[in-house]
């Protein structure tokens, strides 16, 4: 069974701090995605990584796909209160027909 | 820009009652999905429809049925609701059923369902 494990489960930091959240699996994935979800809303895609070792940047967010395509990380530089939310990693199921999701990291950034 | 629209937004049922959650997308997407989200459990796939006329079970299909009414609409039915089905339900769509190719999912804003 494919599993995506995210850590930490909760993270509470001050504005301006840096942080990294992780998404790990024992399975190889053809791609991984990161979504952000705000309260009362559905998840919204942030990025898709498809090549082992790939690094993508989205303003203050840096996403990395592991060389072996079994893990990914999300690094936020100088966190802002607007970064508060639930961060979910997702990858294709074994049949390649739908996404499976990790349990998420809840990030709280306070001023 | 409606995207994916889910109705209702909130619902309270008694055990044994039935109801249908509605989902419609206006992006001409081929594939649609139903997920449930529970605290500490993440998003779990209930059913999906790769294209109009096809439906398949996901990870947690028991107690649910689906209908892909047309390309736009994908409904989820609870025939006899149970307290274990208390959850937030999300409908999503994608251009095609190519999750392995990194297809982007577009989500609705969810239906919060409580079964008493």
Image: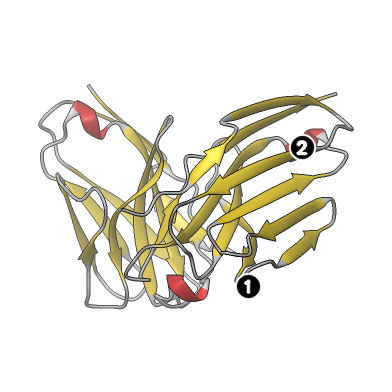
Task: Find numbered disc 2 in the image and state the secondary structure of the residue it sits on.
Answer: strand
Q: Nearer the viewer, residue B30 or A68?
A: A68
Name the front one of labels 2 and 1: 1
Instruction: Say whether residue A5 is left or right of residue B116.
Output: right
Task: Find numbered disc 1 in the image and state the secondary structure of the residue it sits on.
Answer: loop
Which residue is at 45% across, 50% downward?
Answer: A101
Return the disc, 2 or 1, that comes first in the chain's sequence.
2
Q: Quadrant of residue B49?
A: bottom left
Q: Which mark is residue A19?
A: 2
Assign the C terminus of chain A to one quadrant of the image: top right
Image x and y of residue B81, in percent: 16, 35
Q: Quadrant of residue B51?
A: bottom left
Pointer 2 and pointer 1: residues touching (CB < 8 Å)? no
Q: Which mark is residue A7?
A: none
Categorize mark 1 by other alpha carbons within 10 Å: few (<14), some (14-19), many (20+).
some
Read off the chain for label 2: A
Instruction: Say whether residue A54 is left or right of residue A101.
Output: right
Q: Nearer the viewer, residue B25 or A65?
A: A65
**B65 in relation to A37, above or below:** below
Instruction: Say whether residue A98 is left or right of residue B46.
Output: right
Residue carrying label 1: A51
Image x and y of residue B84, in percent: 22, 30
**B114 in relation to B45, above or below:** above
């Amino acid at each position: 069974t494919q599993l995506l494990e995210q850590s930490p489960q909760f993270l509470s930091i001050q504005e301006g701090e840096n942080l990294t959240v992780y998404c790990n699996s024992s399975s190889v994935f053809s791609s991984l995605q990161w979504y952000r979800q705000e309260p009362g809303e559905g998840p919204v895609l942030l990025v898709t990584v498809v090549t082992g070792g790939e690094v993508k940047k989205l303003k203050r967010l840096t996403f990395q796909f592991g060389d072996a395509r079994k893990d990914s990380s999300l690094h936020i530089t100088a966190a802002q209160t607007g970064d508060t939310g639930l961060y979910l990693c997702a990858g294709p199921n074994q049949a390649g027909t739908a996404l499976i999701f990790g349990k998420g990291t809840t990030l709280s950034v306070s001023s | 820009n409606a995207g994916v629209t889910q109705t209702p937004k909130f619902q309270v049922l008694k055990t044994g009652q039935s109801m249908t959650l509605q989902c419609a997308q206006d992006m001409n997407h081929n594939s649609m999905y139903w997920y449930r989200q529970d605290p500490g459990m993440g998003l779990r796939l209930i059913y999906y429809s790769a294209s109009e006329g096809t439906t398949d079970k996901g990870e947690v299909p028991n107690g649910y049925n689906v209908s892909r009414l047309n390309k736009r609409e994908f409904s989820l039915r609870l025939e006899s609701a149970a307290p274990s089905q208390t959850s937030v339900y999300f409908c999503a769509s994608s251009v095609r059923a190519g999750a392995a190719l990194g297809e982007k999912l577009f989500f609705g804003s969810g239906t919060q369902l409580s079964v008493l």
